Image: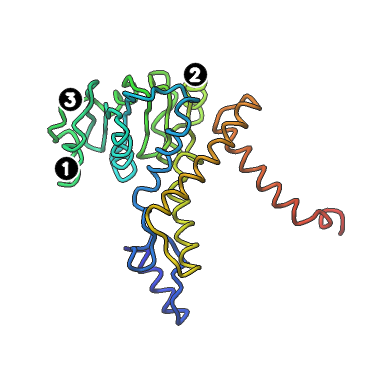
């Protein structure tokens, strides 16, 4: 809602509509369909695309979601849609766990009612938020705050893959420990880029004055995420580095190319 107000205020100053000035607007004010679950959907597309390379099972995938806000809830829904079991979930009120899979509908209903997941008829047991990090699973998706995995708990992670849906959920020392354990981290710069990608789509649509369908938005997002996932994976394999380092190499390479394309004369003249 606030994004719509900001766009309106800018339009008032300029004396004309300018929806492309900001993204994340309500659809009625020039926002894009598909924005609500874009962050989680990007991470979901990435994980599914790399499933074989990550060594994840194609059936019976077990997912633990740390943080059950927008990204966490949508991630749980999306993974369930392919038959995954949501084995653990946490929010600010606590955490719940069931090795056989939680009742996701009950958890979502509790959140919609303004309750914590621990108040839901979840079909599991209540655990501490710290215990969720150590739950046995295939994918651990930290989806809340930064610095949630650190040198004090990284060694307890039993997941094969950590999907960073939050910004900076793993501290550098935690990253090192996970790498030594052989846990693959899908880094936030790539894994949660779905949100900013669909924001870019919104800007493009505003500039064109032509709006895409939900299928078009999701198809374009899937293509971009998978293409960049392949590129980062190839760099990681070629240079024998983590996916996070590979993502930075990929990004810096693009910046270097853009700088070089401007020409180098300025560096040799006074």
Q: Going by the image, does 64 lie left or right of 227?
A: left
Residue 184 in the image, given as x and y percentages of width and height: 48, 25
Earlier residue among tags 1 and 2: 1
**Crowd class of label 1 (few under 14; some 14 to 19; many from 20; radius 10 Å):** some
Write down the quadrant of residue 93 in the picture.
top left
Residue holding disc 2: 182
Query: Which quadrant is the C terminus positioned in?
Result: bottom right
Query: Which quadrant is the N terminus positioned in?
Result: bottom left
158 up-or-down from 70: above or below: above
Q: Nearer the viewer, residue 33 or 188?
A: 33
Q: Going by the image, does 123 lie left or right of 35?
A: left
Earlier residue among tags 3 and 1: 1
- Residue ID at (42%, 23%): 56
Between marks 1 and 2, how big is the CA–CA gap? 36 Å
Describe the element under mark 3 as helix, strand or loop: loop
Residue holding disc 1: 109
Residue 133 in the image, given as x and y percentages of width and height: 34, 25
As drawn, the residue found furthest toward the bottom would be 15
173 up-or-down from 230: above or below: above
Between marks 2 and 3, how big is the CA–CA gap? 29 Å
Describe the element under mark 2 as helix, strand or loop: loop
Write down the quadrant of residue 122 in the picture.
top left
Q: Which disc, if any, is residue 124?
A: 3
Between marks 3 and 1, how big is the CA–CA gap? 16 Å
Write down the quadrant of residue 39 in the picture.
top left
């Amino acid at each position: 809602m606030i994004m719509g107000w900001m766009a309106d205020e800018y339009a008032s100053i300029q004396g004309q509509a300018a929806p492309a000035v900001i993204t994340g607007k309500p659809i009625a004010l020039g926002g894009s369909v598909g924005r609500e679950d874009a962050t989680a959907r990007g991470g979901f597309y990435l994980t599914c695309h790399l499933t074989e390379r990550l060594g994840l099972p194609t059936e019976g995938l077990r997912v633990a979601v740390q943080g059950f806000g927008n990204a966490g809830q949508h991630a749980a829904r999306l993974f369930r849609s392919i038959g995954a079991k949501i084995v653990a979930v946490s929010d600010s009120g606590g955490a719940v766990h069931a090795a056989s899979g939680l009742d996701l509908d009950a958890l979502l209903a509790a959140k919609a009612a303004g309750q914590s997941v621990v108040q839901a008829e979840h079909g599991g047991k209540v655990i501490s938020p710290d215990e969720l990090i150590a739950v046995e699973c295939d994918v651990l998706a930290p989806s809340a705050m930064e610095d949630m995995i650190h040198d004090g708990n990284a060694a307890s992670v039993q997941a094969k893959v950590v999907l960073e849906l939050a910004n900076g959920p793993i501290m550098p020392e935690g990253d090192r420990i996970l790498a030594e354990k052989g846990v693959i981290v899908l880094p936030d710069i790539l894994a949660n880029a779905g949100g900013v990608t669909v924001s870019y789509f919104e800007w493009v649509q505003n500039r064109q004055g032509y709006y895409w369908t939900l299928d078009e938005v999701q198809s374009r997002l899937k293509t971009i995420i998978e293409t960049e996932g392949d590129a980062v994976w190839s760099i990681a394999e070629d240079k024998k580095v983590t996916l996070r380092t590979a993502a930075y190499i990929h990004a810096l390479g693009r910046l270097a190319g853009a700088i070089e394309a401007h020409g180098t004369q300025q560096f040799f003249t006074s």
